[in-house]
Image: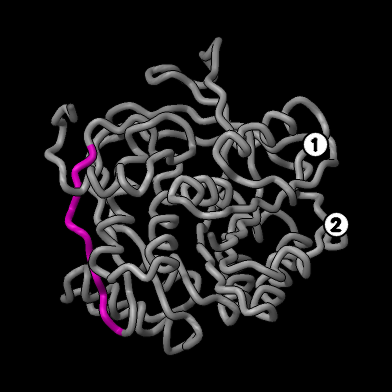
Amino acid sequence: MKKIITFGEIMLRLSTNAGTRLFQADQLAMHYGGAEANVGVSLSHFGHDVYFVSKVPENSLGRAVESTLKAQGVHTNYLIKGGERLGTYYLEAGVGQRSSQVTYDRAHSSFSQLAIDEIDFDEIFSDAKLFHVSGITAALSPSLKELTLSALKKAKEYGVTTSFDFNYRAKLWSQKEASEAIKSMLPYADICSCGELDAIYLLGIDQADESLDKAAQLKYYYSKIQEMYPNISYMSSTFRNVISTSTNTLQGNFYKDGVLYQSKVHQIDHIVDRVGGGDAFAAGILHGIIEKVPPQQLISFATAASVLKHTVAGDFNVFSPEEVAAFIKSEPGKIVR
């Protein structure tokens, strides 16, 4: 198996039951997760050798994180212990036309105080095949922004394939801050997850001709990004239409060698948990690239993996490649006997 590294913060998620506002709640469901950890768990279930690089406190929550990752098949050799708290966020589950709401409580977390001299990226990347990180990690502190850039540079020194997901979060940093940071990192990325709004507002690309259909517009943005950063070989994103909190449509997009490949449009009804759906898609893309899956088959697999994630609670996607492949071929709602 090929060694894969993901780097980011894993947090405790506390979620309300559907139909309960956060200020009303007298009980909350606990899950652990975070963008890069979620990708790592998915890749582990897809049969890859995954190591998660992070920092958690030396207390019961930190130990729970470690045992949770190990239970999902993710190696914790590079999980540093220290600091005083695990980052937390609260999810108020939406219903119908009311959107879900996230409240962060992650300031001064152990991970946000991670220092560059605590990590030996020479050791980590010496025998690695792939490195994945997102803009969320870079957004958490000035030192983590520098650390993320340093990690991408070091990975390239060791010939490691690099994956960067924009994952822009307005609650973490401004468009200007994100734009400056991401532009400094993209020269070191081989694989990029981003959409049309990222191209316009974070990379400053002129808006596409609105008379073009959505696919043609996205292809235009991807071609412009590749002109700016010819090192990027693959790009991906999804088209999501939110009908209600529990019903969405989802279509995957994958760009390679100037060609845009698209999955079929999936209708997801009823959504159990949308959190982690994008990470499941990103993991499907990475799995396909690593395994040299043909592009059309790759994007069908990645999108189906994301759709399946919407059907389980928690951040993690816990389906095997065989289960994803069977889902692609199956009839919706049919009992598998």
Is residue 261 inside the magenta stretch? yes
Please report whichever mark, 2 or 1, sits nearer to the chain's N-terminal start.
1
User: Which stretch appears magenta?
Assistant: 258-268
Quarter of the image where one finds residue 160: bottom right
Residue projecting furthest to the top? 26
**Residue 201 at least partly seen:** yes
Residue 133 can be seen in this image: no
Please tell me the numbered disc located at residue 171: none
Q: Which amino acid does label 2 sit on?
A: Glu
Residue 274, position as x, y percentages in the image? 38, 38
Q: Name the residue under label 2.
A: 118
Characterize the magenta stretch by its predominant secondary structure: strand
- Of 301 and 29, which appears nearest the observer? 301
Compared across the picture, whether 301 is left or right of 65 comes to left
Mark 1 neighbour class, 10 Å CA radius: few under 14, some 14 to 19, many 20 or more: many
Q: Counting other residues with Cα less than 10 Å from the Cα at mark 2, is it few (<14), some (14-19), or many (20 or more)? A: few
Q: Name the residue beneath numbered marker 1.
A: 57
Tell me the residue at 21%/68% (across/down). Answer: 214
Left-right relation of 170 to 154: left
Query: Is label 1 in a helix, a strand or a loop?
Result: loop
